Amino acid sequence: MQKVTILCVGKLKEKFYADAAAEYAKRLSRFCRLEIIELPEERLPENPSPALVDAALAREAEAIRGKLPAGAVAVAMCVEGPLLSSEELAKRMAGWAGQGGSHLVFVIGGSFGLHPSVKTAAAQRVSMSPMTFPHHLARVMLLEQIYRAYQINAGARYHK
């Protein structure tokens, strides 16, 4: 059974996000071993300078690198990645599994995204949308899309 890790910066504080994430985690238990690792988001002042943001992202990147398992396929969720349909994500996940990618790690940054070094080190970059979403909502959306990908690959009726 494939292992999927969601490595994310920031904790889910709102109950509705936590409830939605828990529901998809429960659904995914049929298809994979899911692990969600939350890393602390660096605190910044109200209007931080670009230098402060970059320094915070660099510290978050160090924490992310410390949690990336060796041999895992790392996928950076960032706007620079290609936009994939649900079917394309399903194909890629099946392809990674077929190429020995028994452990997938999806990385979601905090409010200011991911440091360039994390994006560069990832095996793949994926964009969810050109629109901006709260990173907590992005986690729920990603969990749903991973669940949908497994459903597509299983030939189930969930994906219409």
Image (tube, helix red, strand yellow):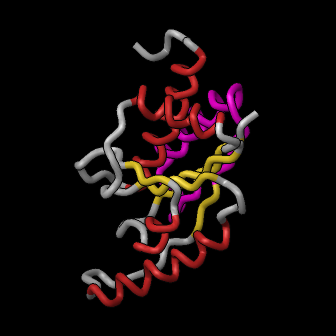
- For the image, the number of numbered tags is 0
Expressed as whole percent of the image width and height from the top left, the position of residue 141 reads 43, 40
Residue 61 lies in the magenta stretch? no
- Indicate whether 60 appears above or below 121: below
Q: Quadrant of residue 54?
A: bottom left
Q: Is residue 126 left or right of residue 33?
A: left
The furthest residue to the top: 157
Q: Is residue 16 left or right of residue 65?
A: left
Q: Quadrant of the C terminus?
A: top left
Expressed as whole percent of the image width and height from the top left, the position of residue 41 reads 49, 72
Expressed as whole percent of the image width and height from the top left, the position of residue 2 reads 71, 37
Residue 15 lies in the magenta stretch? yes
* Residue drawn at 70 percent across, 61 percent down: 69
Q: Nearer the viewer, residue 137 or 76?
A: 76
Q: Which residues are magenta?
A: 7-36
Q: Nearer the viewer, residue 132 or 13?
A: 132
- Indicate whether 24 appears above or below 65: above
